[in-house]
Amino acid sequence: MARMAIFGKRIPDEVQTFVERTINSLLQEGCELIMYRGFQHRINEQWAVGWEFPEFKNAAELQACAPDFLLVIGGDGTILDASTLVERSGIPIIGLNTGRLGFLANITRDEAPMALKAILAGDYSLDERNALEAHTASDDIIQPNFALNEIAVSRKGTTSMISIHVSLNGEFLNTYWADGLLISTPTGSTGYNLSCGGPILLPGSNNFILTPIAPHNLTVRPLVIPNADTISIKVEAREGNFLASLDSRVFTLDCETELTLRRADFRFKLVRTAYTDFASTLRNKLLWGLDRRN
């Protein structure tokens, strides 16, 4: 019998039937369900379903439950939030998409019944994704200090550009005069990085990407680096501070603070089935192959 933890945030009313059927089918398959407290309370208030599953409310309680899987109902942003609960535990994440097609939550509503059956039958693989860690002289400034998608350094409270001094393994690389700088993982290469003109990396690539945000010098282009490199960052800004965002979590740092970024010493495990693969997600999400003029 599989123990399945369930995490979600806001769910639109139009997917109520789908969510209820998914929960009922897991129960029929003999799963033991544990639900995120905020999600269960919100669903009970929104739909009056009367769920009374055992609950967890933070990373420690989730990990103490030792679930076989964490089923995330929502989109890619919901998975990024869920990553702060999984942390270093290695709990496999299943992404069930209730909206538009996602790169992380890529099991669609149509595929969900067969995909979940396959997972419970053991017919799945684990797609391990590298993460980034951020460190400062006082490591309690940024917590949690990891990012699955990207770490962004950007200006705060001003329209003026900032100067971002970057070194790799102790050797000076460049001073970026820009609105900000993205340091993306392969997982994050299809997110903010892509919007800023950065390249797409396959999930298994052992690289990170440095992508400037609206740089003053147009010759300053995105740079792909080995993920074994240590990245040191110092910022100059008129306001005396700047923003560091780790996925969706934003921190205000003083310009005296030096950031050190490196590959995390753990990986996140995403569950993959025969119904999901990165290449098909790329084609569907980016509409590749729809132009028949070639």
Image (tube, helix red, strand yellow):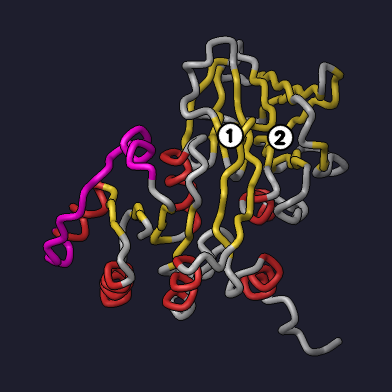
Asked if residue 160 is positioned above or below residue 190 in the image, the reply reads above
Q: Which residues are magenta?
A: 45-66
Query: Is any part of residue 27 visible from this angle?
Result: yes
Which of the image's four quarters has the N terminus?
Answer: bottom left
Residue name at image x 56 percent, y 24 percent: 242
Of the pair 278 and 76, the residue shown nearer to us: 278
Mark 2 to mark 1 CA distance (whole Å): 11 Å
Q: Amino acid at mark 1?
A: Thr
What is the crowding at mark 1: few (fewer than 14 residues within 10 Å), some, or many (at least 20)? few
The answer to whether residue 95 is magenta is: no
Q: Quadrant of residue 173?
A: top right
Q: Amino acid at mark 2?
A: Ala
> What residue would you read off at disc 1?
159
Secondary structure state at the residue bearing disc 1: loop
| Image coords of residue 276 (percent x, y) | 60, 70
Residue at the front extreme? Answer: 1
Instruction: Find residue 266 and report its horizontal and vertical position in percent.
Output: 61, 35
Q: Is residue 72 left or right of residue 176?
A: left
Q: Which residue is mark 2?
A: 178
Magenta stretch contains residue 58? yes
Q: Position of residue 215 (x, y in %)?
A: 75, 39
In this rendering, the answer to whether 287 lies above or below 259 is below
Q: Residue at x 82, y 41 (%)?
A: 223
Estimate the x, y position of residue 82 in percent, counting from the top left: 43, 46
Residue 169, quarter of picture: top right
Quadrant that contains the C terminus: bottom right
- On screen, residue 205 versus residue 252, left or right, reads right
* Sooner in the amino-acid sequence: mark 2 or mark 1: 1
Between 248 and 134, the residue placed more toward the observer is 134
